[in-house]
Image (spheres, rainbow, N blue to C red):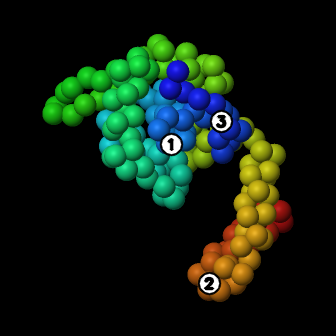
Amino acid sequence: MMFGGMRGPWGHHVYHSRGFVGIRYWILRILSEGEKTGAEIMSTMESITMGRWRPSPGAVYPLLRDMEEEGYVKSTERDNKKYYSLQEKGREMLNMLGAGSFFGRDVETHGIDETIDRIDDYISYLKDNREQIRSSQISIEKLKRLKAEIDSIIG
């Protein structure tokens, strides 16, 4: 089977093929929301990662072709574009993974406590990169703005 297990950034198992860890999983998740072109899939990935990552056509289109051959997705041509949709086999894979729906720009945030835990994880990352932050006035200003927003929430 092309899907081999490994843990992804949200604690779910993501599945990899040809070194593209997680892209197959993301494609299935995105198509669970409805039919999309390959370009729309790439744009959705970019949106979900808040602009931090956009996969290349060379990563997405070969996987879409493979996933279609494997029966996870189906393509339909219309208006000179190829639209992809999730097949039953793809839905079964998502059900096996326990995948929920996307919420805005974040993935699977289920409440305040989980959101705070994620912020705590990012703060740990920022601490680990403190010297890089201190050398960037832009980063310092952004963090000051975020601190003020958090202070306004707390009261």
Please, which residue is most extreme toward the right here?
155
Residue 81 x/y as whole percent: 21, 34
Up-down relation of residue 151 to residue 46 (above or below):
below
Numbered label attached to residue 71: none
Instruction: Describe the element under mark 3 as helix, strand or loop.
Output: strand
Q: Nearer the viewer, residue 55 or 51?
A: 55
Q: Which quadrant holds the C terminus?
A: bottom right
Q: Position of residue 65 (x, y in %)?
A: 33, 29
Apparent side of residue 11 relative to residue 155 in the rendered image (left or right): left
Amino acid at circle 1:
Gly
State the separation of the CA atoms marked 3 and 1: 12 Å
Q: Earlier in the sequence, mark 3 or mark 2?
A: 3
Which of label 3 and label 2 is nearer to you? 3
Badge 1: residue crowd in 10 Å (few <14, some 14–19, many ≥20): few
Which x, y percent locates residue 57?
33, 46
Q: Amino acid at mark 2?
A: Ser
The residue that appears at 47% across and 46% down in the rendered structure is 45
Instruction: Give the residue type that dot 3 points to.
Output: Met
The residue depicted at 70 percent of the width and 84 percent of the height is 134
Image mark for residue 19: 1
For the residues labelled 1 and 2, the Cα–Cα distance comes to 34 Å
- Asked whether residue 151 is in view, the answer is yes
- Verify CB contact (< 8 Å) between mark 3 and mark 2: no
Q: Would you say the residues marked 1 and 2 are in contact, meaning their CB atoms lie under 8 Å apart? A: no
Of mark 1 and mark 2, the one earlier in the sequence is 1
